[in-house]
Image (tube, rainbow, N blue to C red):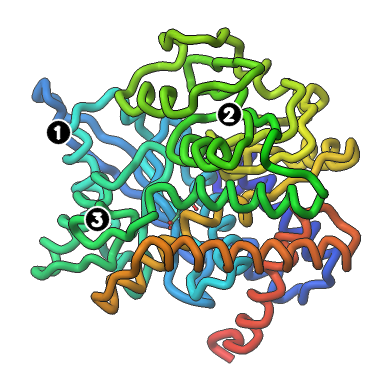
Amino acid sequence: MSLFESPLFKDAFEQLEIAAATMDLDPNILDRLKYPKRALQVAVPIRLDDGTVKTFMGYRVQHNMTIGPGKGGIRYHPKVDLSETAALAMLMTFKCALVGLPLGGAKGGIQVDPNELSRQELQALTRRYATEINMIIGPNIDIPAPDIGTDGQTMAWFMDTYSQIKGYTVPGVVTGKPIGIGGSLGRAEATGKGVAYCVNFACKKLGRTVKGSTVAIHGFGKVGAPAAEDLGEQGALIVAISDVSGAIYNKDGLDVEACVEWVKNRNYLKDMKGDHKMISNDELLALDIDILIPAAIDGVVTKDNCHTVKAKIIAEGANGPLTIDAIEHLTKQGAFIIPDILCNAGGVIVSYFEWVQGLQNFFWDLDRINKTLHDILEESFEVVCEAADHYKVDMKKAAMIGALKRLEKAMRLRGLFPA
Ligand code: GLU
């Protein structure tokens, strides 16, 4: 697949062009932002437990590093390819710029279903991938983190492999590490917590309250579960959650803690017993609720099913869960959309805190982390609302404009090499 072919890349590209036209972005800057700075494709061969060798395709794409080192997760998923990784790297550039981090945008991944590999095979895969991309990453170059299909353990293997190559321990090469090897308090829940903060800001803006609001969460994983816990604690009614096996629904609210315990042991929701009924993922998206949080993967709400969505606030917990057509339709219907590069930025913000703490060898307490995360997101939310008012555009376009303003300034200051 060519670099520009995936639906996600086309969507990101279109978002960029629309925002650039609205804000009158310097065409020379726009031209440079259309292409990733660097893209590496690697073969990742490993020996499986049965003794045979299998080769997987891996990628690392660095989109733009004007403001700082590349930053972005590593995804293990069957859909991963060069084009999707490039789109996600581009979104990381805009995400980091919007929330004011001194970081650029990057993304990596391997085309694999991690559920089909044993722990030993996953370790081999991660170590070989880390070795193959080692020449373009580093604490001052490009810093990976978890994404779909990867976690703290993946980062620990990655960090260990990179450190073995260097001959000394380099905690700053990745973020999202377990606490015992330099991870940050609050990182595991940070994306979900950030989503919950953004839902609070949106409710306040619209004169609504989180308490008593009904919420459905598509994708009850690393992002959806902590968001549900947080909003549940604030008195929201989490009426539906889903995973790949389907969704569970109770109009009076689910027992979120019981659901968290259930999925923690890698159980499917469809097998869970309790005071709820099973519905399909499509039915979850169409529920008559106040807040919808698509927190699984991209392309979930499209022009084909957006007409069924009734939620008043839609918080993009995943990267690109709503297509551009869907966002346009839903905004016209009066829905308030919290765009991904703002809504799920909590993860990369606390990654940044982890990176800073690691470089200084000085660790913060959880209150400081959550307070700083809250303040950065609140300020960024304001930036997006102001751009939406100023340019009379929806929140999605406004977020992109906010990011482009900062990038434009930095790229102008640095100029083009050679002059
Ligand atoms: N994978 C997350 C994202 O899409 C986090 C990236 C990071 O922490 O670097 O934002």
Residue ID for mark 3: 179
Which amino acid, by three-letter code, is at mark 3? Ile
Label total for image: 3
Q: Residue at x 30, y 24 (%)?
A: 265
Percent from the top left, x then y, of residue 247? 55, 17
Which structural element holds mark 1? helix
Left or right: 13 in relation to 271 = right
Indicate which disc, 2 or 3, sits on the residue closer to the N terminus.
Answer: 3
Q: Residue at x 18, y 36 (%)?
A: 46
Q: Is the C-beta separation of discs 2 and 1 under 8 Å?
A: no
Q: Is residue 62 visible?
A: no
Which amino acid, by three-letter code, is at mark 2? His
Mark identifier at residue 120: 1
Q: CA distance from mark 1 to mark 3?
A: 22 Å
Q: CA distance from mark 2 to mark 1?
A: 30 Å
Crowding near the residue tagged with mark 2, few <14, some 14–19, many ≥20 C-alpha atoms within 10 Å: many
Which structural element holds mark 2? strand
Q: Is the C-beta separation of discs 2 and 3 under 8 Å?
A: no
Along the line of sight, the residue nearer the viewer: 113 or 291: 291
Is the C-beta of the residue carrying label 3 under 8 Å from the nearest atom of ligand 1? no
Percent from the top left, x then y, of residue 218? 58, 29
Give the label, 2 or 3, closer to the camera. 3
Indicate which disc, 1 or 3, sits on the residue closer to the N terminus.
Answer: 1
Give the label, 2 or 1, closer to the camera. 2
Q: On screen, 271 above or below 176?
A: above
Percent from the top left, x then y, of residue 149? 37, 37
